[in-house]
Image (cartoon, rainbow, N blue to C red):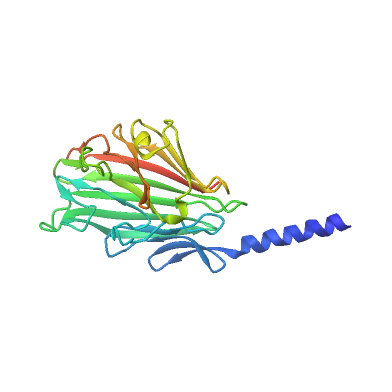
Amino acid sequence: MRCIFLSLLLAISSVVCAADYQCVKTDNGAKLVNGAAVVWELVVKTPEGKPYIHPVALPDGRVISELRPRDHRWHTGLWFSWKFINGVNYWEPSNGKTEVESWDAVIDGLSATVTIKLRYFDDRNPDVILLTEDRTVVFSAPDEKGSYSISFKHHFTAGGEDLVFDRTPLNIPWGGYAGLSLRMNQSVKDFKLTCENGGNTKHTVRAKPASWLDFRDEKTGQGVRFIVIKSTEQTRFYLLDGGHYCIIPSPVHEGPITCKAGESFDLEYLLKIGY
């Protein structure tokens, strides 16, 4: 009888914990909450023109993402940005503009699928759309441990001219970045880095191709795994640490990529949070 009673209590506790989660469509995106805490939130329309996800929280409640830190106000948690398109800067505030054209969010229980149409242009010639993007972001429901995943599919199509996507050259200490980026806060300062290519520092990770990078708290086992599903031959994991924590599987790290007028290409990524 005691075992039955304990089992019933555990079952009730599990139901209560599950009921604490709620996934909702908002006026500007979607979010998952656990009681009063926000687990993740996707914000579509932003002052920068680029959708972002913040917070990104671990199952234990720790928020690892950082929004608009003082050192780089244009870093917005988990977001996507090109660096240079045909020589114009789209990363920092400049003439290169990213703009949301339309979006929708479909909620299915505790999971969500957000579709976004974006366009890219030089604000000195705003009537010419250089690039369009169809983006799909899928959030899985949290599992019994609270872990979840976020997948990204980016479909880019060049407008009426050939496009060259580039980065700051590698002979500059901070050169090489562009693309999907996760800016993290000081809570990750003791996390351990492991990578498919055997690298365990920001320099050795960049040295070789890799399809995944893991950044994890050894004490709790919780962290984030960044997986590259589809990208370019030039892709390398760009990592910053020492107080300015950032993970970027940059598709232009080893050199520029091109897209002919009217042609398309795809990038795909998966983030596992917790686990």
Residue 143 can be seen in this image: yes
**Residue at the right extreme?**
1
| Relative vertical location of residue 53 with respect to residue 197 in this rendering, above or below | below
Between 116 and 202, the one lying in front of the other is: 202
Measuring from the top left, give residue 16's x and y in whole percent. Answer: 66, 64
* Quadrant of the drawing holding the N terminus: bottom right
Measuring from the top left, give residue 111's x and y in whole percent. Answer: 51, 55
Labels in figure, total: 0
**Residue at the left extreme?**
124
Location of residue 22 by image quarter: bottom right
Between 271 and 19, the one lying in front of the other is: 271
| Relative vertical location of residue 184 with respect to residue 163 in this rendering, above or below | below
Residue 63 is left or right of residue 221, and the answer is: left
| Relative vertical location of residue 44 with respect to residue 262 in this rendering, above or below | below
Measuring from the top left, give residue 85's x and y in whole percent. Answer: 18, 46
Residue 21 is left or right of residue 29, and the answer is: right
Between 149 and 178, the one lying in front of the other is: 178
Residue at the spot x=35%, y=53% of the render? 79
Location of residue 250 by image quarter: top left
Residue 33 is left or right of residue 82, and the answer is: right
Between 242 and 91, the one lying in front of the other is: 242
Location of residue 3 by image quarter: bottom right
Measuring from the top left, give residue 140's x and y in whole percent. Answer: 51, 51
Residue 262 can be seen in this image: no
Residue at the spot x=51%, y=58% of the render? 62
